[in-house]
Amino acid sequence: MAWIVKDSAHAKIEKRDEPYLSDEMKRHFEAELLPRYATRQAALLPVCHEVQHTYGYLPMQALAEVASFLGLSNAQVLDTVTFYEEFHLQPVGKYMIQICRSIACELCGHAFLSEKVKQKLGIGPGETTDDGKYSFVELECLGACEQAPMCLINEELIGDLTWKKLEAAIDECE
């Protein structure tokens, strides 16, 4: 992981008129999520997951609205979502190709698979194709080391990966 230093204190947040956290979402969070946690802060990750699931990524305005809703600072929310690889602050492709790079997958050849994905799609880790169809990410662990090497395409876990198997899965994406 690399730290990227930027002057975010003076950054302008693009805002749309309509809030990202609708009244309906807030009611859902209050009724379904918040009662499960001892504090509002503890619900931060599931709230962010639902917001990202709704919009495909976490716009800065949405993060500010989440912070306000949960009674947290903007910095607390931003620090949290930038720590976890599964959160995206920019729009991502329709198909997320995520290759595990944990030690088990590393020993089983994840680097070769990542290189082949780069060649096939013309993008590197953390990038999205110009047509917005594919995004490619390397993750630390997908939690199924017995199937190494492995990847996740959107929400489908594919283990015991070979290039032939991965290429076929990519080609199956519409």
Image (tube, helix red, strand yellow):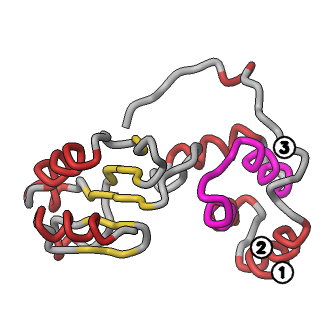
Q: Quadrant of residue 163?
A: bottom left
| Along the viewing direction, whichever of 57 and 101 lies nearer the viewer | 57
Residue 80 among those drawn in magenta? no
Does dot 1 land on a helix, a strand or a loop? helix
Q: Is residue 63 left or right of residue 110?
A: right
Position of residue 102 relative to residue 169, above or below, is above
Q: Is residue 109 left or right of residue 75?
A: left
Residue 53 among those drawn in magenta? yes
Disc 2 target residue: 34
* Quadrant into which the C terminus falls: bottom left
For the residue marked with disc 3, what is the amino acid?
A: Arg
Q: Where is residue 107 shown, x and y percent of the image? A: 8, 56
| Along the viewing direction, whichever of 13 and 27 lies nearer the viewer | 13
For the residue marked with disc 1, what is the amino acid?
A: Ala
Whether residues under marks 1 and 2 lie with C-beta atoms below 8 angstroms apart, the answer is: yes
- The secondary structure making up most of the magenta span is helix
Does dot 3 land on a helix, a strand or a loop? loop
Q: Where is residue 118 shown, x and y percent of the image? A: 23, 44
Estimate the spatial distance between the alpha carbons at disc 3 and disc 1, rounded to whole Å.
26 Å
Disc 1 target residue: 31
Of the two numbered discs 3 and 1 in the rendering, the one whose residue sits closer to the viewer: 3
Magenta span of residues: 49-70
For the residue marked with disc 2, what is the amino acid?
A: Leu
Residue located 36% across and 68% down the image: 173
Q: Residues within 10 Å of mark 1 (few under 14, many from 20)?
A: few
Estimate the spatial distance between the alpha carbons at disc 1 and disc 2, rounded to whole Å.
7 Å
Q: Which mark is residue 16?
A: 3
Q: Where is residue 159 shown, x and y percent of the image? A: 21, 74
